[in-house]
Image (cartoon, rainbow, N blue to C red):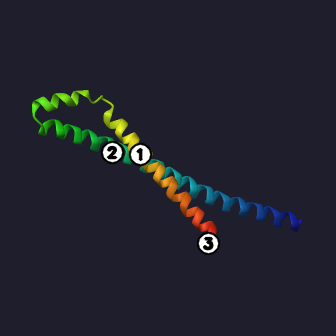
């Protein structure tokens, strides 16, 4: 009987440890997704404001050329910039992991 109680308490503490670990990982991942979405939205708003500012500051003849920019231009620009940032981050992390594998 003492063996069963020992195994049950061991299983309970192991489940508690993994529960804390997974909760922490999930919280970090959720925060990262929220931060990425917020940064992307901020980039779209900033690019829209830049295009609107350029429209207000240039002469009318040049302002007509901005009608060639599609309505989703800021979203496309932010997607391109986000993709380049994601690729840079991926390359940076893989390089760090490669260096750490040489050290250890």
Q: Is residue 59 left or right of residue 29?
A: left
Q: Is residue 73 visible?
A: yes
Q: Position of residue 12 (x, y in %)?
A: 73, 61
- The residue at the point 71 percent across, 58 percent down is 15
- The residue at the point 53 percent across, 52 percent down is 29
The residue labelled by disc 3 is 103
Q: Position of residue 58 (x, y in %)?
A: 12, 37
Which element carries disc 2, helix, strand or loop? helix
Mark 3, Cα crowd under 10 Å, few <14 / some 14-19 / many 20+, is: few
Q: Is residue 75 above or below residue 42?
A: above
Which element carries disc 3, helix, strand or loop? helix
Q: Is residue 43 above or below residue 24?
A: above
Quarter holding the N terminus is bottom right
The residue labelled by disc 2 is 43
Q: Position of residue 40 (x, y in %)?
A: 38, 44
Disc on res. 38? none
Quarter holding the C terminus is bottom right
**Distance (Cα) linking label 2 and label 1:** 9 Å
**Distance (Cα) linking label 3 and label 2:** 38 Å
Question: Which circle's residue, 3 or 2, is located before the other in the chain?
Answer: 2
Which element carries disc 1, helix, strand or loop? helix
Marks 2 and 1: CB-CB under 8 Å? yes
For the residue pair 16 and 79, the one nearer the viewer reads as 79
The residue labelled by disc 1 is 82
Mark 2, Cα crowd under 10 Å, few <14 / some 14-19 / many 20+, is: some
- The residue at the point 10 percent across, 30 percent down is 60
Question: Which circle's residue, 1 or 3, is located before the other in the chain?
Answer: 1
For the residue pair 29 and 97, the one nearer the viewer reads as 97
Q: Position of residue 55 (x, y in %)?
A: 16, 35
């Amino acid at each position: 009987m003492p063996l069963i109680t020992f195994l049950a308490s061991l299983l309970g503490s192991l489940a508690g440890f993994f529960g804390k670990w997974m909760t922490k990982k999930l919280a970090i991942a959720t925060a990262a997704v929220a931060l990425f979405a917020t940064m992307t939205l901020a980039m779209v708003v900033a690019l829209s404001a830049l295009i609107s500012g350029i429209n207000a500051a240039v002469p009318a003849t040049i302002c007509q050329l901005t009608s060639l920019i599609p309505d989703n231009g800021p979203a496309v620009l932010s997607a391109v910039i986000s993709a380049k940032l994601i690729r840079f981050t991926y390359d940076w992390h893989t390089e760090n992991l490669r260096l750490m594998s040489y050290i250890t």
